[in-house]
Amino acid sequence: MIIELKSKILNDKYTEYVYNVFDIQNKEESIVNIPMTLGEARTFDWNIGIILGGSGSGKTTILNQIGKIKEVKFDLEKPLISNFDWLEPDEATMVLTSMGLSSVPTWLRPFHLLSNGEKYRATLAYMVSSAKEGEYILIDEYTSVVDRDVAKAMSFALQKYIRRENKRIILASCHYDILEWLMPDWTCSPQKGGALERCDYLRQGRPEISLQVSRVEPDTWNIFKEHHYLTSNCNKGFGYLLFEWQNKPVGIVVYKNQPNGYIQNSFGLSRTVVLPDYQGMGIGSKISEFVAKIIRGENNLNRVFTKTINPALGEYREKSPLWKPTSKNKVYRSDIKGKNKRYKHTVKRNSYCHEYIGDGLGGYENLLKPINEMRNE
């Protein structure tokens, strides 16, 4: 199929100059031909297609032939999450988390106060969750306005959601670096004749992410604190482990020793935070798991407990054989009134509570030394 675009030329001295200098023969109309062969997409099951090509190659024109590109307008007076009012509150939090927008404080901000990356994720969340059954979700200029690391993280998060919900999405983009993260079922490039190409070779899984871990001073928490749903304060006596990717801070896990008379050698994971640019890649679950492994130790001497209300992290642990629910798992806690100051800020909420039961890992003992001891080395 060829999409032919015609436009009448309104001639003046400028167009006459172009005709004379560049030897243009057709002086009456401008014609653009865009090849497109997407009919084969009807012959197999798919969830994700991508139209690739440089600027001016006809990507937007092809999308417009397929259907109408939805325009999203957020109510700038409302918190972001309140714009998803066709969903139940728990469903809205899940779709935002699924798009890698997991920072709870961000949900309470109006759209115009979000970063460019957060705005893009929020818009994606709105478009994919509002799509009706059988409707094509059409996204133009995909990831053109975000950092490339954000684009990769976003693509991986998006494909997980689309496949889980069995929806269909077609994206137009000029960026090839997202293909391994998006893992599309097919691509189409007008610059290559417009033929649909199956992409089974891209369905082998996303590229490996190698993170570096180091023990850091408590002040490093300042980079991450605004993205956690609990108070920004964090005890300086806790342990802080920073994770970096390509020399950029990505996430942090804060752990604490929590001895009591019932459980010996007990530790807790107090905070796990991944910066917004890297959310949606499954990093949070992996770094918290790694810290649990090294605390557990080579001989499995220590016990590690964790509690979170983050739905993505909590549901991951619910399904993982490495985590066991505790008696407090998903049990609502009522407000505790009384003189005990320790509980004065306890609120009613449903938390995921688990104990790590997988094997420990040796060789990282230096990361767990008391901070004063490390400073003196």
Image (tube, grey):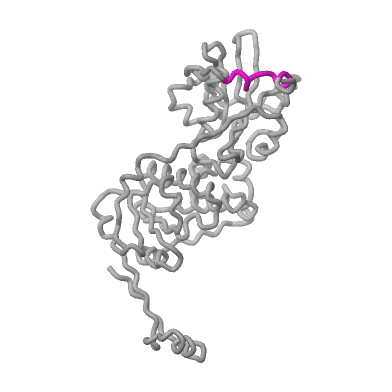
Residue at 47%, 56% (x, y): give it.
Answer: 142
Residue 179 appears in the rendering: yes
Could you tell me residue 313's position as x and y percent?
51, 32
How many marks on residues?
Answer: 0
**Residue 306: in magenta span:** no
Q: Main secondary structure of the magenta part?
A: helix
Residue at 57%, 20% (x, y): give it.
Answer: 364
Q: Residue 56 or 162: which is nearer the viewer?
A: 56
Q: Residue 86 or 369: which is nearer the viewer?
A: 369
Picture quadrant where residue 351 is located: top right
Screen quadrant of the C terminus: top right
Could you tell me residue 220's position as x and y percent?
69, 34
Q: Residue 240 or 325: which is nearer the viewer?
A: 240
The answer to whether residue 18 is above or below residue 104 is: below
Residue at 54%, 57% (x, y): give it.
Answer: 145
Could you tell me residue 172's position as x and y percent?
42, 59
- Magenta highlight range: 364-373
Picture quadrant where residue 211 is located: top right
